[in-house]
Amino acid sequence: MNILVVGRGGREHAICQKLSVSESVNNVFCAPGNDGMKGDATLVSIDEMNFSALVEFVEKEKIDFTIVGPENPLLAGIVDYFQERKLAIFGPTKKAAEIEGSKAFAKQLMSKYHIPTATFATFTDLQAAKDYVEQQGVPIVIKADGLAAGKGVVIPHTLEEAYRTLEEMLVHKRFGEASTKVVIEEFLEGEEYSLMSFVNGDKIYPLAIAQDHKRAFDGDQGPNTGGMGAYSPVPHIGEDVIDRTLASIVKPVAEAMISENRSFTGILYAGLILTTEGPKVIEFNARFGDPETQVVLPRLQNDLAQVIQGVLAREEVSMEWDENVMLGVVLAAKGYPNAYEKGLVIEGVSSISEDAYVFHAGTKLKDGQFLSNGGRVLLVGAKNTTINQARKAVYQELEQVSTDAFFYRNDIGERAIKNVSSSFERTHTR
């Protein structure tokens, strides 16, 4: 097969890397990709929003199917555009992708179909939003309704911070059109986890779970980001919880989308939290998560291309998983998720060992050196028998990289280690 991956970040690099080792794949193309992917895919200089040029390339190169990585082309209707031309593509239609494109839509869908999530209200009026926050109290969760690259969620712990956040979003349009409407949610406490599933209508094929780290700094401090690191599996989230999640959340939402005439095909990402009342939804995405994809796909033992073919054909697909732990840490430009510089030399990348995984997200190659070209620059990952060993291996590799212009979290995986240790102690002191 010849396969085209649409996108340019770390998620797309992980997809390309997995496809590049598929026995059923001859050629992997990525449009537009980034320079760090060149060992795993042939780059095609077509922007992911240029649908006509992408279709022309697909027809010329006899691409068997296209995989869409990022959310923007999905919400702009790339799948509809390809399907109208009878071209195979893996991803949700524009109507189905709305489950990510509008948080208000997703919350209303969950309310209508009794899918467990935080209580919420939506607002376009500043004073009404402030009154609601005053009534509910803090901490509280404020989300821009539309896409904000993972940065549109704020958790104020004081009323003053909540009012300021609402003014920034609704009045000053901090996230442009994405924040002309806000969703205000109850603050939930518990252990967070991510479950991605291949979906085709009512057929669901769950992947291994992962745990992401959204806050910029150690100890879950600082602003929300697109994700600063992740690991899979999540030892303190048991199979019983995953089964409950599938039964009470993933299956019902897939069926709800059919009922709403928005049948979903592609990757349905559920961002979840395990509360005292059971699993609840934090958010849905309509594509592979980032950085979860970079730690989940390396554990998949199946041929990814054949899995997707099977999902598209609605066949039975049994996925096998490497029992080893995969952990990844994101290197980001100083200032991210706010203002940051581009074009900075990433010193030490070439010193990272071949045993490690390096997924490029925002890099470009100039005069033989990798330069930064985004907020999240790359992810360094390692696979090992325990989370402790995987974590140690990643941080040893990151010591090779200069952090004068960059930063990373030093505590990725610590939560799992603490949870496993406390569980061990409880079991052995009874």
Image (tube, grey):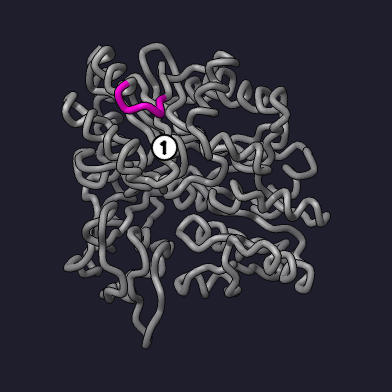
Find numbered disc 1 in the image and state the secondary structure of the residue it sits on.
loop
Horizontal side of residue 356 vs 40, given as left or right? left
The quarter holding residue 430 reads top left
Specify start and end residues of the magenta stretch as a single range: 123-127
Residue located beneath label 1 in the image? 180
The amino acid type of the residue labelled 1 equals Thr
The residue lying at 59 percent from left, 67 percent from top is 31
- Viewer-nearest residue: 109 or 1: 109
- Residue 401 place in picture, x, y as percent: 25, 68
Q: Is residue 42 above or below residue 149?
A: below
Depth check: 16 or 423 in front? 16
Q: Residues within 10 Å of mark 1 (few under 14, many from 20)?
A: some
Q: Residue at x 37, y 30 (%)?
A: 192
Q: Is residue 384 left or right of residue 45?
A: left
Which quarter of the picture shows residue 42? bottom right
Residue 218: image x %, image y %? 20, 44
Check if residue 74 falls in the magenta segment.
no
Task: For residue 230, say whether it is visible.
Answer: no
x and y, in percent, of residue 233 in the image: 44, 39
The vertical placement of 204 against 366, above or below, is: above
